[in-house]
Image (cartoon, grey):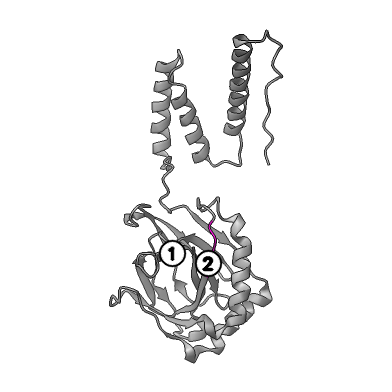
Amino acid sequence: MTAFPVSSSPQPTAPGVGHLDQRFHNLVEQSLTTLEALLQDESLTPSERGKLALDILALAQQSPEAPELSRLQGMGHALMGTRNLNLTSEPSYLNEVVCFDDFLSPEENQNALAIALDQQEKFVPSSTTSKADNYRQSCILYATHFPQFYHQLKHKILVALPDIWTPLNHTPFPVTQVEMQLTVHGDGCYYKVHNDSGSPETITRELTYVYYVHSEPAQFSGGELRLYQTDPHDGRLLDRNRFKTVIPQNNRLVLFNSRCQHEVMPVRCPSNGFETSRFTFNGWLRR
């Protein structure tokens, strides 16, 4: 944790209004010192420091130097805009994603792959709540077929939650249910743009998670998770040309807001073998 310097102790003054003025002045001085320290704090992102600087300039508009500060503020907004940084406090879910690499032990990871390979005949074709044709192609295995691993992975995800609230810009909530399924994407499989909480049946889904598992070295290509800038009010896709890509890396856990529009890019698996496919244990945390 960063320790911020504070200004020297207030000098004694006469009691009364003058004393209150002095105390207020000292508080202002301490606040300015803290803000200066924050602007130098490398644990903050450039976007966060830039927004802080612009907010300070906005608060200083009533000072005698207001005209000059206004000019500096305008220059700051222009500069930040050229860097394509999102300075709004409104979430768009584009950058609100958390990845944990090597999430499970090597033994647990191999066990997860064995669960998939040993139950090939139990997978069933996937579907969507809208029942749209040619929108999703994959097969799934329900968690009832792997109860022990379900509880193991569920526990580890719940333990990790305190580390994800801030990067996901999400308010903590009581998790009432953790859904899970095992999904396989073979050659030519995909899932077009969608979100995971857009129907009455799924409205209580808050967070989506994806745990990747596959044989190594990977014998498929594609299958990236693509997260799009999304309107937080109505869940609309805001810009198809602005997205973040997550590579399907073995033993990686990914979490993001279930309202975020996303898709699974088409998978290419030349061998067309089940054992060389892209597998995920994926699901949702409901409030």
User: What's the residue type where badge 1 is placed?
Assistant: Thr
Q: Is residue 148 left or right of residue 267?
A: right
Q: Which residue is mark 1?
A: 204
Q: Earlier in the sequence, mark 1 or mark 2?
A: 2
Q: Which residues are magenta?
A: 173-177
Occupied quadrant, residue 98: bottom right
Q: Which residue is mark 2?
A: 176
Residue 18 in sight: yes
Could you tell me what secondary structure mostly forms the magenta stretch?
A: loop
Q: Quadrant of the N terminus?
A: top right
Residue in view at x 38 percent, y 61 percent: 261
Q: Nearer the viewer, residue 245 or 261?
A: 261
Q: Label 1 vs label 2: CA separation?
A: 10 Å
Q: x, y percentage for residue 106?
A: 67, 74
Q: Is residue 129 left or right of residue 146?
A: left
Residue in view at x 33 percent, y 57 percent: 237
